[in-house]
Amino acid sequence: MRQLTRREITYAIFAIDGGKGGVGKSWLVRLLAFLLTINEIGWVGFDVDPTNQNFIRFHANDDITFIDWTIPGEWDRMLSLISQVDPEKCILIDFASQIGSVLPVQYPRMQATADHLGRQLFRLWTASPEYDSLNILNQTLEQVSCDRTFAVKNMRAATKEDFREWDLSNTRASLLAAGGTELVMPELSVGAARALEREDTPFIHASLDTLPAWFYYDVQAYLSEVRTAFAPLIGRISQ
């Protein structure tokens, strides 16, 4: 994947959503941090989970702010901080699993902020094969314009057959027909994933100093797949 030049980049806001816990939102935001970094795109983050701050945990040395979504004033603080972010940095927001009840109010406010700043707001929906994941997306499909929504099928703990109901659903068809994009998050071996997690290692820092050689190989092969799989997303922030 060629590196983008500064002139080509649209410094977007990425909201990582998923409607429920355990679908891979924090894993996805870590992958996005990796992809932006290898493309020499600066970023700042917001971890909007008061109970399980995995984004901060794995990126303790990066510019990530904790936001307690249960406190209404915290949303105002986040939007104010977003307005102050360097215009040449992207913004990653890792939402909590219980946050769906407030997003019908907060997504329009985020969109208004993005429009004012001249940024694009993208929603990345982390899809799991369970029906409730599909149902929640169906109920919230209009919260962000479909042409700025990416449905990311999480294959870490699933097979293609597990996503058969998703693949045949009217929700998927409606999303794609309205300009939405589907991505596939590849599978990483359990051993390699656990090795990263034991040391709180960001993908960008995976090395032979942090991993046994066989897990290092697994991670590098995985990240190569990720770069290919997420090329449509990186393409969307290039002008």
Image (cartoon, rainbow, N blue to C red):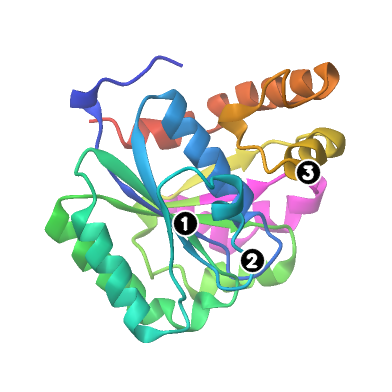
Q: Which residues are magenta?
A: 151-177
Q: Earlier along the polypeptide chain: callout 2 or callout 1?
A: 2
Q: Is residue 34 visible?
A: yes
In the structure shown, which secondary structural element does the residue marked by tag 1 occupy?
helix
Residue in view at x 76 percent, y 18 percent: 217
Q: Earlier along the polypeptide chain: callout 1 or callout 3?
A: 1
Residue assigned mark 1: 175
Residue assigned mark 2: 52
Viewer-side residue, 128 vs 224: 224
Q: Amino acid at mark 3?
A: Arg
Q: Earlier along the polypeptide chain: callout 2 or callout 3?
A: 2
In the structure shown, which secondary structural element does the residue marked by tag 3 occupy?
helix
Quarter of the picture containing the C terminus is top left
Q: Amino acid at mark 2?
A: Asn
Residue assigned mark 3: 198
Residue 152 on the magenta segment: yes
Badge nearest the viewer, 2 or 1: 2
Which numbered disc covers residue 193? Answer: none
Residue in view at x 19 percent, y 43 percent: 87
Q: Residues within 10 Å of mark 1 (few under 14, many from 20)?
A: many
Q: CA distance from mark 1 to mark 3?
A: 37 Å
In this rendering, would 82 be left or right of 141? left
Residue 122 on the magenta segment: no
Q: Can you tell which quarter of the image residue 232 is in? A: top left
Q: Residues within 10 Å of mark 3 (few under 14, many from 20)?
A: few
Report x, y in % for residue 2: 40, 14
Q: Are marks 2 and 1 in contact (CB under 8 Å)?
A: no
Viewer-side residue, 96 vs 157: 96
Q: Amino acid at mark 1?
A: Leu
Q: CA distance from mark 2 to mark 1?
A: 30 Å
Q: Can you tell which quarter of the image residue 69 is in? A: bottom left
Q: CA distance from mark 2 to mark 3?
A: 16 Å
